[in-house]
Amino acid sequence: MSTNDTPNVITSYALAPTRTIDAGGVTYAYRELGPKGGIPVVFFVHLAATLDNWDPRIVDAIAQNRHVITFDNRGVGASTGDVPDSIEAMADDAYTFIKALGFDTIDVFSFSMGGMIAQDLVVKHPELVRKLVLTGTGPRGGKDMDKVVAVTYYDILRSILTRKDPKEFLFFNRNATGKPAARAFVNRLKERTIDRDKDISQKGFRAQLKAIQKYGRSAPSDLSTFTQPTLIANGDHDRMVPSVLSEDLHRRIKDSTLIIYPDSGHGGIFQFHEKFAPVAAEFLAA
């Protein structure tokens, strides 16, 4: 078991036990690792994702020095209840979960749909979030945001036909650099062998897609009110949540930092984890 200065501190996501907490009539499943104390970093996960979908290379890098919490959204994986069909409701659930754990201030690390939830959380509860990491995501009402659904179904079909993980198509370019990066990422997600989470249901998956579509077709949120230091990152060829939406977020959020990785897609931060993980850890530590 990897440890830092404090004895028995788990800093490997593969070894983090799954816990539960009851709040607002829902039992939320979550995992925590890293040294406790101070402001935790709460991870907001992507479409269809469970606790097992976080890249351990990124989680572990941040957990070296920070208390990290990952959780299953309502109705997903080991969390009970029904999956909401709006991003706002998911943000309300996240707030309920975080307050149940007893935190008044958190840092947020988010990816894709998680970034949409994180934005709605900050809009409603700006005092809760100190720092914000938004990766592979875009703003409410962003251009072509509602096309996520069509791209997702197309790539799921391609994955069924080739017997590959859909994330290999959705997150990575199908070229000489993207294909090996995709396989390496999918293999890293299998490193945890104990206490695996259960997959999202078809019903829950459809509810999430509906929520993203609504989010894409809604009036934009006023992100000029965001005062949190914000790090935005993506690949330069994101087919799921077009890369221009990361630039749009950067324009809308004052003093934000934008990183675009070359020759990579929606999962650019996973393809470039060796570069990105230290940058994210440093941003959250500063």
Image (tube, rainbow, N blue to C red):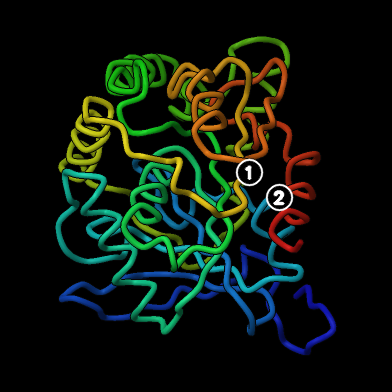
Residue sitting nearer the eye, 3 or 146: 146
Q: Amino acid at mark 1?
A: Leu
Q: Position of residue 14 (x, y in %)?
A: 62, 63
Q: Nearer the viewer, residue 226 or 161?
A: 226
Mark 2 and mark 1 residues within 8 Å of each other at the beta carbon: yes
Taking the spot 40% from the left edge, 55% from the top edge, the residue there is 122
**Residue 213: image location, x then y, percent:** 23, 28
Report which residue position mark 1 lands on.
231
Q: Nearer the viewer, residue 135 or 45?
A: 135
Using the image as rendered, state which of residue 91 and residue 263 is in the foreground: 91
Image-based side of 98 in relation to 132, left or right: left
With 139 as the anchor, is 43 left or right in this view?
A: right
Q: At x 75% / y 75%, what residue is drawn?
A: 1
Point out which mark residue 276 bears. none
SS at badge 1: strand
Q: Earlier in the sequence, mark 2 or mark 1?
A: 1
Residue under numbered circle 2: 280
Q: Position of residue 245 (x, y in %)?
A: 48, 23
Name the residue rendered at 35%, 52% in the picture. Answer: 123
Identified by mark 2, the residue type is Ala
Q: How far is the residue under mark 2 from the one under mark 1?
A: 8 Å
Position of residue 224 relative to residue 125, above or below, is: above
